[in-house]
Image: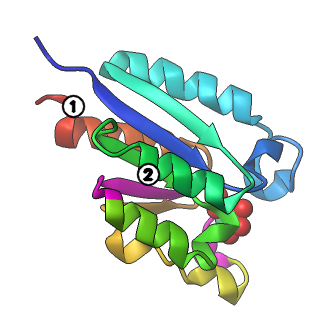
Amino acid sequence: MKQNKNILIVNGPNLNLLGTREIEIYGHLSLLDLLEKLEKEAKKLNFKLQHLQSNAEHVLIDTIHASKNKIDYIIINPAAFTHTSIAIRDALISVDIPFIEVHISNIYSRENFRSHSWLSDISKGVISGLGVDGYIWALKTIFNRIGKI
Ligand code: DQA
């Protein structure tokens, strides 16, 4: 019998405002709507989903630490911490859990400071600019990589 994999979705600062924040960039879907979509997809793929959104760097770090030996794969949209947080980078390295970095917007087509990520080079891959579908593609990729084991 195929094992249920545990996937953690981590969303960083201001993503609690999805659906009301800069709609022309981030779209109309709320975080709750997004989570419903992800739950539906996760069910199809036989994944168990956990989710955390926080505006506080230390909460994101504590959650990553707590995932060690419990979570098989992480999907993280670190939001603005992408461009600033060596601490989140170190946390991901220290737990040694594979992760995919997701951005709703195309960070390479915006202000220059968004083009640098402290996480991309240690990630399994980066999805940027596909809207909230990026999270779904990340789930499908994880399924192709470890879902059938
Ligand atoms: C973001 C891009 C970041 O530059 C920005 O700070 C965010 C969201 C995205 O999903 O496109 O808050 O990570």
Label 2 SS:
helix
Residue to which mark 1 is pinned: 147
Q: Quadrant of residue 81?
A: bottom right
Seen in the picture, residue 88 relative to 145 is either above or below; the reply is below
Would you call the spot at circle 2 few (<14 residues within 10 Å), some (14-19), or many (20 or more)?
some
Quadrant of the snapshot with the N terminus: top left
Seen in the picture, residue 89 relative to 75 is either above or below; the reply is below
Residue sitting nearer the eye, 85 or 28: 85
Seen in the picture, residue 16 relative to 100 is either above or below; the reply is above
Marks 1 and 2, the one that precedes in the sequence: 2
Residue to which mark 2 is pinned: 65
- Here the colouring is rainbow
| Ligand 1 position by quadrant | bottom right
Residue 110 percent location from the top left of the image: 70, 78
Q: What span is colored magenta in the figure?
A: 95-109
Residue sitting nearer the eye, 141 or 31: 31
